[in-house]
Image (tube, rainbow, N blue to C red):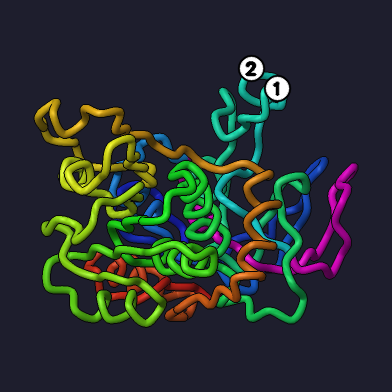
Amino acid sequence: MRAMVFDGTTPRLALRELPRPAPGPGQVLIRVEACGVCRTDLHVVDGELPEAALPLIPGHEIVGRVAGLGPGAEGVDEGARVGVPWLGHTCGRCEFCRSGRENLCDAPGFTGYTLNGGYAEYCVADARFVFPLPEPGDPVALAPLLCAGLIGYRCYAKAGTGRRLGLYGFGAAGHILCQIAVHEGREVFAFTRDGDVAAQDFARRLGAVHAGDSTAPAPAPLDAAVIFAPVGGLVPLALRSLKKGGRVVCGGIHMSDIPAFPYADLWQEREIVSVANLTRADGEAFFPLAEAAGVRTETVPYPLEEANRALEDLRAGALQGAAVLVP
C-alpha cells in the first residue's frame, strides 16, 4: 500500500510503498476513503509533540470501509463504513477509565501519533474505538467530524450552556461548532487572525452574530469562550471579554505559553480549563447532534501524495475549513 511516512529527521513526510497491515486480536483492517489533516498533525511533524512512535503514518480523522476482522473483533461488520478518531486505545483499568474519563487514560494509544494512522491506503484500528458512519455520506465531508468535530464538541460541552459563545480561531473545529451552537439558539462571536476578512465572512455566513479580529474585545460580555488557535496570548484576551462566572476553554493539544495577566481579569469566578482528547461517549452524543444540526463541513481535498502541501497550507493559514487527503 502507499503511505505518507514521518521519520522525524525533517518536518516532511515521504511517500512509501509498505506492506498492507494485518489486523491483530480485536482489530479491524480499514480501507481508507479519506483522512482529514489536523493541526495536531502539524504539531507532530514540527516536533511540538515529541513522543511520536517513529517512523509514523500520521492522520486521525479517518473515514473508511472495514476490509477485514482480526481474531475477536466485535461490533463491526466487513464492508461497513466507520470512522477512526484520535483516541485509538485505552487500558480500561486505570482510575480514569474506570470512572468514565477514558480521555485521561494512563496508558492510551493515539491514532496517528503512537499508533499508525490514516495517511495511507489502509490502516488497522481497535474495533472498540471506531464509530459507525452514515453509508451515503461523502467521506471527504465526514472526515473532519472525527477530530475537529469531536474535540469541538467536547469543548462545547465544557463551555456550559450560556447564550453568548466566543470562538477564537475559525478553522476546521470552529466552523463545525458554530453550526451546532447556532442550531441550539446560541449567539456565536467569532474571532480570527487580524485582518482575515475571508474567515470573518465565512463565520457570518454560518450564523455568527459577530466576526472580528482576535485582538479586539468582544462587543458584548461572553458567557464562555473556546480557543482553538494554538496561541497562548489569546487566553488573557478572551478572559477580558467574559462576564462574571464565565469560562475560557483551551481546545488544543499544544499551545504557546500563556503570558502573565492581572488577577483582576480572572477574579469573580472566571475560569480557564483545558480539553484533553475525547471519549467514546462524546462520539455517541456528537454524531446525532451534528446530523440534527445539519452540519456541513467546508473541505479542500488533496491527493494522498500531496500531504506535505496540505500541511503547509494549514501552517500558513491558507485554508477555509479543513484539508482532507484522499488515497
- Left or right of residue 239, residue 269 in this image: right
**Range of the magenta residues?**
53-81
Is residue 61 visible in the rendered image? The answer is yes
Q: Which amino acid, by three-letter code, is at mark 2?
A: Glu
Q: Which amino acid, by three-letter code, is at mark 1?
A: Arg
160 vs 123, nearest the viewer: 160
**Is disc 1 placed on a helix, strand or loop?**
helix
Whether residue 64 appears in magenta in the rendering, the answer is: yes
Height in image: 57 above or below 104? Answer: below
Q: Position of residue 70 (x, y in %)?
A: 84, 49
Query: Where on the picture, by quarter, is residue 133?
Result: bottom right
Q: Quadrant of the C terminus?
A: bottom right
122 vs 96, nearest the viewer: 96
Residue that appears at 43% across and 49% down:
162
23 vs 296, nearest the viewer: 296
Q: Position of residue 136 (x, y in %)?
A: 74, 81
Q: Are marks 1 and 2 in contact (CB under 8 Å)?
A: yes
**Is disc 2 placed on a helix, strand or loop?**
helix
Residue that appears at 62% across and 41% down:
279
Q: Which residue is mark 1?
A: 98
Gap between marks 1 and 2, in whole Å?
Answer: 5 Å
- Left or right of residue 50, residue 32 in this image: right
Characterize the magenta stretch by its predominant secondary structure: loop
Badge number at residue 95: 2
- Left or right of residue 67, residue 283 in this image: left
Residue that appears at 25% across and 51% down:
221
Q: Position of residue 1 (x, y in %)?
A: 63, 68
